[in-house]
Image (tube, rainbow, N blue to C red):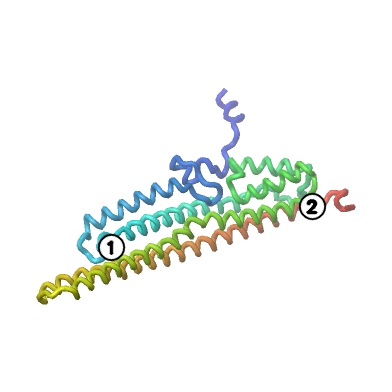
């Protein structure tokens, strides 16, 4: 009886989005393709920011490095949160991209040289697709193939498959660009926050310098007052430095990640040409047309 139940059970898919997607594993609804869950990434960014500040307070509180983040107004705190949020998004997108790449090694069409993809065999290919993955719509490659082959099965026009694949490829490219919008916004916002800190620091320094000049005090008192001026200048230059370093690091990593995603989309297009378009044959009524 147990053996009969096991034989009737469906085989587990080779790739399971519900079980292997990093966001699904953490109990959150996973973003489609390489998109990320904004709420999850924000929560993790806040946790990382708290850990970062707690570590520098407990270990290197009196060092110049710690002072750049603790004693330079509110802008370093916001920059750290935005940098951590961007870093978490980039990490999740990289992890999801590696997961999506695994679809390129899966074969859904028969390997026989004489196999022809047509309206009579498209059902077998779609059935094989649902055997290798649990939800094709969550995978860039198989969602593209599923849309094109569903059109072939419903309309019976082989000539439309290539056009559908190209149209879906354009949508995937647009979706990839959109998935970087939040990080690009942070890369723009972080230097702006640095400039805000610069203006605040310069304002403090100029105001303190004016007070020093207006005093007829002893040299010792003037030296004490000048510390306020130098503190304002430190805020001005160090916030800009931190902001530019953060923005540069994020921009380099995002550029590298976007290049990898574009290469993955190119690999998906090559897969479709080799395993789908290359096995199509026009039907008689299409040849006559």
On the picture, is 18 further left or further right than 143? Answer: left
Q: In which quarter of the image is the N terminus?
A: top right
Of 194 and 269, the residue lying toward us: 194
Estimate the x, y position of residue 246 in percent, counting from the top left.
39, 64
Of 132 and 156, the residue lying toward us: 156
Q: Nearer the viewer, mark 1 or mark 2?
A: 1
- Which residue shows up at 88% across the image and 48% down it? 285
On the picture, is 178 further left or further right than 238? Answer: right
> Badge 2 is on which residue?
159
- Which residue shows up at 36% across the image and 59% down it? 79
Q: Which of marks 1 and 2 is nearer the N terminus?
A: 1
Estimate the x, y position of residue 28 in percent, counting from the top left.
46, 41
Estimate the x, y position of residue 279 in percent, counting from the top left.
75, 53
Total marks in image: 2
Q: How crowded is mark 2: few (under 14 residues within 10 Å), some or many (20 or more)?
A: some
Local SS, label 2: helix
Disc number for residue 72? 1
Query: Quarter-wise, where is residue 176 in the image?
Result: bottom right
Q: Distance between the residues labelled 1 and 2?
A: 64 Å
Local SS, label 1: loop
- Which residue shows up at 25% across the image and 61% down it? 71
Estimate the x, y position of residue 168 in percent, counting from the top left.
67, 52
- Which residue shows up at 65% across the image and 43% down it? 129
Disc number for residue 98? none
Query: Quarter-wise, where is residue 174 in the image?
Result: bottom right
Of 256 and 66, the residue lying toward us: 66
């Amino acid at each position: 009886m147990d053996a009969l139940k096991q034989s009737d059970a469906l085989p587990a898919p080779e790739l399971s989005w519900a079980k292997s997607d990093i966001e699904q594993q953490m109990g959150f609804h996973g973003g489609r393709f390489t998109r990320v869950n904004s709420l999850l990434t924000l929560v993790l960014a806040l946790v990382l920011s708290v850990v970062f500040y707690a570590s520098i307070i407990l270990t290197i509180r009196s060092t110049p490095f710690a002072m750049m983040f603790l004693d330079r107004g509110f802008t370093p705190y916001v920059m750290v949160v935005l940098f951590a949020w961007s870093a978490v998004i980039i990490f999740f997108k990289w992890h999801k991209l590696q997961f999506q790449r695994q679809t390129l090694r899966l074969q859904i069409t028969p390997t026989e040289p004489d196999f022809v993809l047509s309206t009579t065999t498209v059902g077998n290919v779609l059935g094989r697709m649902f055997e290798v993955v649990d939800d094709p719509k969550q995978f860039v490659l198989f969602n593209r193939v599923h849309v094109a082959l569903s059109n072939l099965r419903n309309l019976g026009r082989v000539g439309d498959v290539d056009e559908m694949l190209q149209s879906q490829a354009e949508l995937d490219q647009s979706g990839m660009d959109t998935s970087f919008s939040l990080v690009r916004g942070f890369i723009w916002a972080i230097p702006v926050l640095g400039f805000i800190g610069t203006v605040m620091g310069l304002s403090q320094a100029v105001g303190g310098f004016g007070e020093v000049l207006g005093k007829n005090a002893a040299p010792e008192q003037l030296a004490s007052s000048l510390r306020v001026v130098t503190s304002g200048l430190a805020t001005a230059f160090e916030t800009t430095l931190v902001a530019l370093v953060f923005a540069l690091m994020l921009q380099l990593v995002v550029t590298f990640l976007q290049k990898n995603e574009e290469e993955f989309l190119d690999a998906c297009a090559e897969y479709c040409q080799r395993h789908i378009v290359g096995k199509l044959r026009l039907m008689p009524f299409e040849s006559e047309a």
